[in-house]
Amino acid sequence: MILRQFDLNLLIIFEALISECHVSRAADKVFLSQSAMSHALNRLREQLNDPILVRTESGLQPTPRAKALAPKVRNALQLLQQSLLPPDDFDAARSERTFTIASTDYFEAVIFPDLLNHLLTIAPSIKIEIEMIREESSHKRLANGEVDLVVGLNSQQPLPSHLIVHPWLTETQMCLVASDHPHIKNSLTLKQYVKLPHVVFMDVSQDGQAKNIDAVDQWLASKQLSRQHMARTVNYMAAARIVEKNHAVMTLPFHMAQLFSQMLKLRMVKPPKGIPSINMTLVQHPLYSEEPSVSWLTKHIQTFSQNLSWKA
């Protein structure tokens, strides 16, 4: 018999009938009326071309074929039942899972060190690999499960509509200049800002010209202004080291600016009024959003980030 021609619902009926060897009790077991069970038994006999149950002096008894089928049907039903159960919760304390996060420099430098320390107190044997965000991170690699999450993208970044995008963190922006810069005090006017040479971060997660135009450039363009791009880098640390050695300026999220001002001979300077903040996102693929380990990691990143208590 071809499987698609068989009513698989009858397998549940078959198991009940063979277990009980009694039509009424079998009907009660699967919550059917006796007449409905009798009808189902007749359909089974027709589809299997076998009496299934026959009346004897000891009552109804299964035929040899029914006896042979019974353990196989029970195993199949048990396997289906197990497959349909919700997945087990993620056992963080025992897991040795390796997570892959595609992230920005901001997440890797500012958030990840303390986040990892926090996660390892809960899940001491997990591993987390960080890779640079590229276009394929939020497309092919996220879709096939090679990347679990994409963290830190600007909310203005265009993404495929099927992806799940969560708001993550919002950061004001600051400027960095060399500690010994002779012409800049504690803040910049817009006039000063556009006259200075800038070291600009290049967003490699985007294609074509989009990678060269960020929110600051768009904000300036809305005022019919532009800034002088002295250098472009794909790494904030490299940009910061260039600024340290030149009379240039860079614009970056506040807490990354704070970190670099502690590590290098740089100081923080207030940017011109109106410089846009950065709204960052956490991106998931819908195929894996309910997978217990990915849900666990997402929840902990969001909770950890919301509970940050930074000192400016």
Image (cartoon, rainbow, N blue to C red):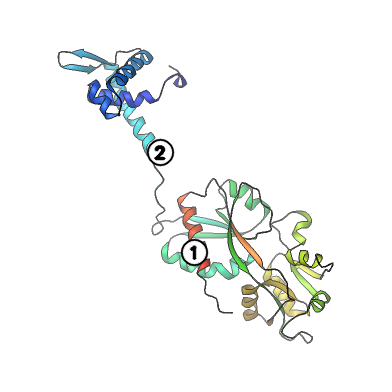
How many other residues sit within 10 Å of disc 1, few (<14), some (14-19) or many (≥20)?
A: few
Residue name at image x 65 percent, y 59 percent: 155
Q: CA distance from mark 2 to mark 1?
A: 30 Å
156 left or right of 226 in image: left
Q: Quadrant of the N terminus?
A: top left
Q: Which secondary structure lies at badge 2? A: helix
- Which mark is on residue 84? 2
Under mark 1, the amino acid is Thr
Query: In the rendering, at what x and y percent does residue 57 appear?
Result: 15, 13
Under mark 2, the amino acid is Leu
From what the image shows, is residue 16 above or below residue 248?
above
- Which mark is on residue 303? 1
Q: Nearer the viewer, residue 249 or 60?
A: 60
Residue 276 in view of the camera? yes
Query: In the rendering, at what x and y percent does residue 262 appear?
Result: 62, 81
Query: In the rendering, at what x and y percent does residue 183 appear?
Result: 79, 86
Q: Which secondary structure lies at badge 1? A: helix
48 left or right of 28 in image: right
From what the image shows, is residue 52 above or below residue 132?
above
- Which mark is on residue 124? none
Q: Nearer the viewer, residue 117 or 156?
A: 156
Query: In the rendering, at what x and y percent does residue 142 appear?
Result: 59, 50
Residue name at image x 70 percent, y 68 percent: 276
Q: Quadrant of the C terminus?
A: bottom right
> Which label lies toward us, 2 or 1?
1
Residue 103 in view of the camera? no
Q: Nearer the viewer, residue 124 or 285?
A: 285
Residue name at image x 42 percent, y 20 percent: 6
From what the image shows, is residue 204 above or below residue 231?
above
How many other residues sit within 10 Å of disc 2, few (<14), some (14-19) or many (≥20)?
A: few
219 left or right of 261 in image: right
